[in-house]
Amino acid sequence: MTGQETNDRKGDVLVVENLVVETGGRRPAPILNGVSLRVAPGETVCLVGESGSGKSVTSLATMGLLPKGALAVSSGRILVEGEDVVSASPSRLRQLRATRMSMIFQEPMTALNPVLTIERQLEEVLSAHSQMSGAERRSRIRDILSLVRLPDVERMCRSYPHQLSGGQRQRVMIAMALVLEPKLLIADEPTTALDVTTQKEILKLVADIQKRLGTSVLFITHDMGVVADIADRVYVMRHGNIVEDGPIGDILKDPKRDYTRNLLTAVPALHPREARARISNEVVLSTTELGMTYGASSLFRKRAGTVAAKDVNLTLTRGRTLGVVGESGSGKSTVARCVMRLIDPTEGSIRLRNQEIAGLSRRALRPARKRIQMIFQDPNRSLNPRLTVGDSITEGPINYGASPDAARTRAKELLELVGLPADAIDRHPHQFSGGQRQRIAIARALAMEPDVLVADEAVSALDVSVQAQVLDLLDDIQARLGVALLFITHDLRVAAQICDDVVVMQHGRIVEYGPTAEVLGHPREAYTRELIEAAPGRHWDFPNFRPLPTPSGGPVDGATL
Amino acid sequence: MLAYIIRRILASIPVMIVVALFVFLLLRLTPGDPAAIIAGDMATPAQLEQIRQNLGLNEPLVTQFITWSGQLLSGDFGRSLISKTPVLTLIHQRLEPTLSLAIVTMLFTLLLSIPMGVVAAWRHGTLTDSAIMAISVLGFSIPVFVTGYILIQIFAIDMRVFPIQGFRSIFDGFWPFFERIVLPALTLATIYIALIARMTRAAMLDVLGEDYIRTARAKGLSERIVLFRHALRNAAVPILTVVGTGFALMISGVVVTESVFNLPGLGRLTVDAILARDYPVIQALILLTSGIYVVINLLIDISYAFMDPRIRY
């Protein structure tokens, strides 16, 4: 691991030297300014950095997969087992892929071809790169699918990607990447789109296979928790440069650069904060036995509907934050959409400041809409790109009868409140960064002067440093305006930092509900414990650059996974 | 799958009933007495009454509709007012040239337009792409009769490779059939080639940006496999839709081409029937065209399910 870090460059599986990548077109702009890194045999190297730092570009350049015309290597070398891929011919490059270097991607949902069976997609790797007979190929496919621990291999072979879960698809991707046992595996955020429990399984699988086949892994991620769990060595990237590198222990304990320190201190602690003092006992939102069942029997077939939520009882008082946590499919977004009446719940009641809204017609609901507003996950898509920021913010109040002038004045105040200059009002969303756009989305929601804000994964698409700023902003706004916050998230670290109370959901039902310090600090239910244990890097206290003392003792390795 | 097909077939029955009702009302509700139109200007009242009796026009509309539908179902589409031959015989005579023209045109179209679209998308933004798109704009903008006469001038008159006009059945031998159908089919195909090449390019451009195309390249597959196995199959659904609708449109829209090349097809029959106000023939032609549309849409829907495993019943 870190000990064999002598400069034995000859044996390195991957050596990148002074790699410069520029955009195409008339005026090339540099994306990577001389990146150098290396990966030794059997080593796991993490490449970390925030969005736009150039970590994915580095990996795509290594595979020779930079989008044609848009990006191109202008100087530098990339040696895979000593062979330069930058100067390799297209056909040589094709031969190297899957045989010496392979890649797995972030989105298992879209990385597999939806119209070909799993077997076909694996089989074509073998027929493109080997002389195996049909029978050999078939048995090799079954071997590799069992190696990645997929159940019922025969059925998997016949399946199409949409019939598999996200975790299963990522296993198929891994099988596809490793079927010819390449020396180098590049994993580009392979677990970012997965639930924590699935993430843990996939990370363990990669580690096991790595041990068995001796594969080197270049692992790209923005998640310091994952880095702490798997890396031997780390490269930190920013604006197309490597700003720091070293063995994992050094980076976590003693980061030399401010940027690395900031990255680490921005990681929200898993340790829950104490609930704040109640400012009021006024209940602004409550649900009673709320339930949502999709797709009851239709004319042509009888079936039991899919229960997306059942018996959900929540209470939110003024000025408090209630977190709803759970994995994908747990029903947390269904609850958010029911509460917003974006979908109509099939049972139960929703009370918004003592008014029952579960059964209201669209028209009767209109006055209530104003009092509950939503902030969505992806600020790049939740703001209309053709409207100015001012138009987006004032549209709602004007609909509810505010005069355009008054609404505009208020919009300027709100922009200042969320930390943006007042002149942002006449600009368009694309002129802002992701974090700024989420601030605009918050200002838009606040313009309606709601009693309740529903934030559905509102910080999940943001980099950690930006995430920390937006969480601070939400805290600040809550203190000033007394708005209640229903905070939907899959990230326990975020929930621990912002929520007073927390609800843990699984399979559409509430598993555990109580003050955050209680639920996350002393979980009573097995499922809650499972979630907490799956959180990556939970044995490391990132802001303080030291390991956390654990009741079980000692930092984790494969044994506890 | 079978259940899905059966359900789709059942679902097209109401469509055909509505079409039949429309066609029926078309004749009954046109201004003026159908009997008077049929009898002509010189008829006596007694002759008119006789015709009404024959056509059942004195019965209530509902009874008339039921009788008429019953006749249709038993294959009786009535007789042409002009030539007095059964409508079905007329259509039967004309169907072969039209179908031949449509099928050969579609073959030309598919053979040329899909590779054109795929290559244009693959070479997106290059000279090749621009050239293919320029050809496609040209194909759209030149009227069919201009293309037709230009092709006749070049290939039939100057080079004498193909006959100027006419039709031979394929059952009389392939070459006599083919040499006469080539020019009309090419003429008609220009617009469809332009349309489908564009559709293919757009659909392929969408698909080529997908993650699984990057995955396919990361697996070290050849560009041919990436384009045709991975990309084209995913782009197939929108392309198929246009091909299907285009084919249906073609059968009803071959009038001009058939006139230019003097083909005795359905297009000419339609024009003649409309000019002569031959109502039974018009009725039957509308029914036939709608039927073709319904059947082709059905085939498209079923082919979706074969192309994309995510589309399920």
Image (cartoon, coloured by chain):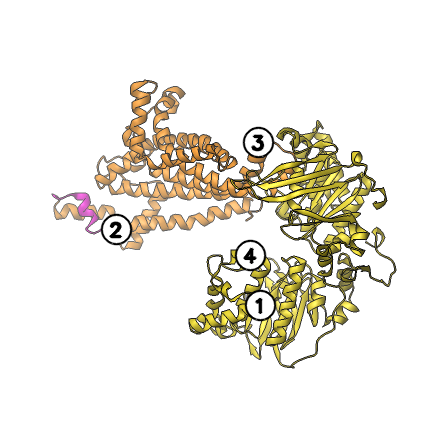
Chain colours: A yellow, B orange
The structure residue drawn at horizontal position 74% and vertical position 57%, both measured from the top left corner, is: A261
Provide the secondary structure element on which disc 1 rests: loop
Q: Between B243 and A225, which is closer to the camera in this rendering?
A: A225
**Residues packed near mark 1 inside 10 Å, few (<14), some (14 to 19) or many (20 plus):** many
Q: Can you give x and y, in whole percent of width and height, for residue A45 in the image?
A: 76, 45
User: Which of labels 1 and 2 is toward the front?
Assistant: 1
Q: Can you give x and y, in whole percent of width and height, for residue B5 in the image?
A: 51, 45
Where residue A68 sits, quadrant-wise, is top right
| Residue with the most extreme top position | B160
Q: CA distance from mark 3 to mark 1?
A: 52 Å
Where residue B95 sits, quadrant-wise, is top left
Badge 4 and badge 1 both on one subunit: yes
Q: Which mark is first along the chain, 1 or 4? A: 4
**Residues packed near mark 4 inside 10 Å, few (<14), some (14 to 19) or many (20 plus):** some
Provide the secondary structure element on which disc 4 rests: helix
**In the displayed structure, would residue A473 be above or below residue B85?**
below
Tell me the residue that label 1 is attached to: A418
Parent chain of label 3: B
Asked whether the residues under the numbered discs 3 and 1 touch, taking CB atoms below 8 Å apart as contact, a structural biologist would say: no
**Residues packed near mark 3 inside 10 Å, few (<14), some (14 to 19) or many (20 plus):** few
Q: Is residue A527 magenta?
A: no
Provide the secondary structure element on which disc 3 rests: helix
Tell me the residue that label 2 is attached to: B28
Parent chain of label 4: A
Asked whether the residues under the numbered discs 1 and 2 touch, taking CB atoms below 8 Å apart as contact, a structural biologist would say: no
User: What amino acid does circle 4 point to?
Assistant: Asn
Q: CA distance from mark 1 to mark 2?
A: 70 Å
The structure residue drawn at horizontal position 62% and vertical position 48%, both measured from the top left corner, is: A162
Tell me the residue that label 3 is attached to: B224
User: What amino acid does circle 1 point to?
Assistant: Val
